[in-house]
Image: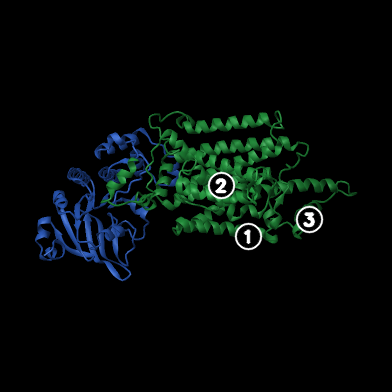
Chain colours: A blue, B green
Amino acid sequence: MSELLEVNGVSVSFDGFKAINNLSFSIAEGELRAVIGPNGAGKTTFMDIVTGKTRPDEGTVLWGEKGISLLSMSESRIAQAGVGRKFQRPTVFEDQSVEDNLMMALKKDRNPFKVLSFRASRDDRDRVATLAGEIGLATSLHRKSGELSHGQKQWLEIGMLLAQEPRLLLVDEPAAGMTLAEREHTTDLLVEAAKTRAVVVVEHDMEFVRRLNCKVTVLHEGSVLAEGSLDHVTRNEKVIEVYLGR
Amino acid sequence: MTDIAAPSSPRGAFVMRHPSVLIFLACLAIFTVGVTVLSEGFGIGVLSTSFIKTLGKTLCLCLVALAMDLVWGYCGILSLGHMAFFGLGGYAIGMWLMYARTEMIVVESLSNAPLPPTPEEISDGIASQIFGVVGASDFPPIWGFAHSLPLQLAAVVIVPGILALVFGWLAFRSRVTGVYLSILTQAMTLALSLYLFQNDSGLRGNNGLSGLQNLPGLDSVSQDAVSMWFLWGSALALGLGYVFCAWVVSGKFGSVIRAIRDDEARVRFLGYPVEAFKLLVFTLTAIIAAIAGALYYPQAGIINPAEIAPIASIYLAVWVAIGGRGRLYGAVVGAAFVSLLSTWFTGGQAPDIVIGSFRLQWVDWWTVLLGLSFVLVTLFAPKGLGGLVDLITERRSPDRHGADLGPDMGSLQEREAEK
């Protein structure tokens, strides 16, 4: 498998605090990966760097077969290149319907003039309806997304990410604040998504990570502490020390 | 206007799919016909010509309010500078009106001379007529196109359009948002107004351009008729502007700009170039404002730099807030309601209120009342007059201002949404 994303020697500090310290990390095409680590390990900062929200002080972030640097690109260009991001808190556009939210996310030309003249075709509507079905919101298409429950908003956001058809999906704590049944549905969605694209899940919850059944990277103080299967990393002495507690 | 998605009928004319547009156009048509019938120029003469002009000007203010609603209510850019674009539109058309009429007067007065006047003599005559008041007798370079109606009409669109494009590009590119952007737009407006106040700005300083109500070559037509022409023109422009704005906000573009208003960062991660969208909306609305201004000032008869003063743009925001931002009819209702009320209060028709020995005169106290109602609307009725429509239709709109309480507090949000 070829590498889709390669993070090399990246460091970033905020007011002298090194949030990311010489982090190197790579994700292969179509890989499902869980990233765990204690608070302040740099998980969210790592996502900020990949999506262009934060510029690192040093290091490289290379993307795709051609190894394009993501560091010189704007957030929107990175998103267009195929990096999708799901935030910790559900951020959907609450004033708009589920259908509008999904339609906006659908992979189409993002040029303002093209958007202005855009009118949804039968295919687009079908695609939105199919996506809504996958995330369990088929009957809520015309409801305002602000009316949805917390779990439903999380799914809607995942649905929007799928609509973007990204090649890499970054998911920040998808299971936070969910009931058990909702967590199971979320796991299914992510595992399903990882069949066609690379998915990186940042999570605190070990049970959730276990259910994903994938390679795990442990971050600590802004760099990689251990990497491997969940059983492998949980046996690692250092990991037990910093993360699982003595 | 936010609930106009009608996916069940994707085909059919745009206006048919959006009944609120149809209702608006019907109201506008009834208003225009009604005024025509009651006018002095073409009807039974119940409404005076000066009142017709007030109504025509109000229609233009409604049009600029539409632009404000698009840029603020829908895209979340609180521009406090759109009346500057409105004023520039007025100046652009005013230059031609003044030039062409002065030219006729000069040619007529020179026609009695023993020798036919040379083009230079005519030009000098016009220049001294127009600029004598500021102690100059040469045409400044910016008057180079004033002789041509088509070129000045083009300037109505191009000059404010380019100003908005350059200003917007600089501001949005540096990601200036929120109150800082509002302050920047105020600064732009103030700078423009101060520049125009100078006598050597080439636009007659604080005298401004006057006599704009007299259309060149139409001296024989009475103002009774001219006022009606402008009312019709303004009504047409408002109707077209409304349909255009409704079209812009109805589709995916409307979705995206509302999303930018609610959570700009999230829209970037969807892959939309947020700055380009903002720039397009800002420029587009500046052009609409300029067109409204070009129709307004020939009815007002005079334009001077005071019209571009920062306070004018703040009034515009107040109209839209009182009418209800984020819905097009709200902007129109707000602008019409507040500006007509303002005309009534400041026109000396409103009865004074006597409290003991104190005499409250509305001419002075109207602004206090307006400011107070703005504060009250912001605090207690953020939806403005448009909120009254919601009371009837009971439209639910979970307005969380993009603020998010986090996963643990998620259930709290959901409870808020229920009410």
Between circles 2 and 1, the one closer to the viewer is 1
Res B96 seen here: yes
Q: Check disc 3 and report the residue beneath it.
A: B128
Dot 1: element: helix
Q: Considering only order in the chain, which callout, 1 or 2, is on the residue closer to the N terminus?
A: 1
Residue closest to the eye, B137 or A206: A206
What mark, if any, has residue A13 been given in the picture?
none
Q: What's the residue at 45%, 58% (across, down)?
A: B176
| Residue beneath disc 1 | B194
Residue position for label 2: B287
Circle 3 chain: B
Give the CA distance from mark 2 to mark 3: 32 Å
| Vertical order, B191 against B287 (above or below) | below
Identify which residue, B87 or B310, lies in the foreground: B310
Residue in the image at 70% along x and 31% along y:
B46
Amino acid type of the residue tagged 3 in the rendering: Ser
Q: Residues within 10 Å of mark 3 (few under 14, many from 20)?
A: some
Query: Toward which corner of the image does residue A149 lie, by quadrant?
Result: top left
Task: Note whether residue B161 is visible.
Answer: no
* Residue B393 percent coordinates (x, y): 43, 33
Report the residue that reaches farthest toward the right: B114
Q: Nearer the viewer, mark 3 or mark 1?
A: 1
